[in-house]
Image (cartoon, helix red, strand yellow):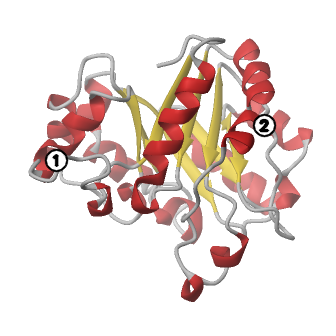
């Protein structure tokens, strides 16, 4: 089974292109769930939501709707508490856990996080704090881009995240690996000009062409053959481009796979 969604849903620049002009923000998730069956919650990287907010996420989505919640930056970028801070996140999102709509946590490590013994020890410590909830690991630096890291993830219990990002020195390639029961791809776009230069524009301002999406068809097929569920999330969220890319990929795959 392949499940397609976007990395977040709460964007004002989606109004008009995806959300109807007069639709209240409190109904955006409901509208989104009419088109997609899953979403990444990325706002948890910046701060912890109120439990009341999370309860609304549960109430506004169908029973078969699923969430992947991003770990807070304390866990992936700052890394000073040995993973203990995950307890605070799990408490906040307990309504997702109780409703069984939470399918995992996303650990997006920065390009400054290089493969090494200390870093691997941290991965081991971090997953021990997750209370059995699946963590999907996204490594952006090329030092992790090898089968040894995939095996490490498999042994520790992490899911592997394949990363579609610009072809720049130091960044990992898109390795369509599977560690465990799940496949996972994050499409960030390929904007080389803005990736390290915010003055030039939004890093995630990218519209995937059909050619670029077709490149992924054999990779997705390979992942889907090895995984029970394969998640495909589009993070090129600028001006609603993630919505367009996700819908287009659905169309391209629907005749070959079971796609939701």
Whether residue 100 is situated above or below residue 234 in the rendered picture: above
Mark 2: give few (<14), some (14-19) or many (20+) Cα within 10 Å: few
Which of the marked residues, 2 or 1, is nearer the chain's N terminus? 1
Q: Residue at x 79, y 32 (%)?
A: 177
Location of residue 134 in the rendering, given as x and y in whole percent from the top left corner: 54, 32
Q: Residue at x 48, y 65 (%)?
A: 74
| Front residue (pair 83, 246) | 246
Quarter of the image where the N terminus is located: top right
Location of residue 209 in the rendering, given as x and y in whole percent from the top left corner: 66, 47
- State the CA–CA distance, disc 2 to disc 1: 38 Å
Q: Residue 60: in sight, yes or no? A: yes
Location of residue 208 in the rendering, given as x and y in whole percent from the top left corner: 62, 49
Choose top left, top right, bottom left or bottom right for residue 116.
bottom right
Residue that badge 2 annotates: 215
Q: Secondary structure at mark 2?
A: loop
Residue farthest to the bottom? 199
Whether residue 259 is situated above or below residue 169 in the rendered picture: above
Whether residue 143 is situated above or below residue 163 in the rendered picture: below
Q: Residue 129: in sight, yes or no? A: no
Q: Residue at x 63, y 84 (%)?
A: 197
Mark 1: give few (<14), some (14-19) or many (20+) Cα within 10 Å: few
Eye-nearest disc, 2 or 1:
2
Q: Residue at x 68, y 55 (%)?
A: 122
Q: Is residue 170 rendered to the left or right of residue 112? A: right
Q: Which mark is residue 53?
A: 1
Q: Is residue 117 rendered to the left or right of residue 77? A: right
Q: Which mark is residue 251?
A: none
Q: Is residue 201 rendered to the left or right of residue 225? A: left
């Amino acid at each position: 089974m392949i499940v397609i969604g976007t990395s977040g849903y709460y964007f004002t620049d989606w109004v008009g292109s995806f959300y109807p002009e007069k639709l209240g923000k409190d109904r955006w998730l409901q509208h989104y769930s009419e088109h997609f069956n899953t979403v990444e919650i990325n706002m948890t990287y910046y701060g912890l939501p109120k439990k009341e907010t999370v309860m609304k996420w549960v109430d506004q989505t169908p029973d078969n709707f699923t969430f992947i919640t991003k770990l807070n930056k304390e866990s992936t970028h700052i890394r000073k508490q040995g993973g203990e801070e995950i307890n605070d996140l799990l408490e906040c999102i307990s309504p997702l856990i109780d409703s069984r709509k939470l399918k995992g946590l996303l650990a997006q490590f920065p390009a400054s996080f290089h493969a090494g013994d200390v870093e691997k020890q941290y991965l081991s410590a971090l997953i021990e704090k997750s209370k059995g909830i699946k963590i999907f690991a996204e490594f952006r630096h090329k030092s992790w881009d090898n089968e040894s890291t995939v095996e490490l993830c498999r042994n520790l219990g992490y899911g592997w995240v394949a990363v579609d990002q610009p072809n720049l020195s130091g960044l990992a390639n898109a390795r369509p690996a599977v560690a465990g029961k799940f496949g996972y791809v994050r499409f960030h776009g390929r904007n080389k000009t803005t990736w390290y230069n915010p003055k030039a524009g939004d890093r995630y301002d990218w519209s995937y062409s059909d050619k670029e999406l077709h490149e992924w068809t054999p990779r997705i097929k390979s992942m889907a053959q090895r995984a029970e569920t394969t998640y495909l999330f589009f993070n090129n969220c600028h001006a609603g481009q993630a919505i367009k890319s996700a819908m287009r990929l659905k169309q391209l795959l629907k005749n070959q796979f079971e796609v939701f």
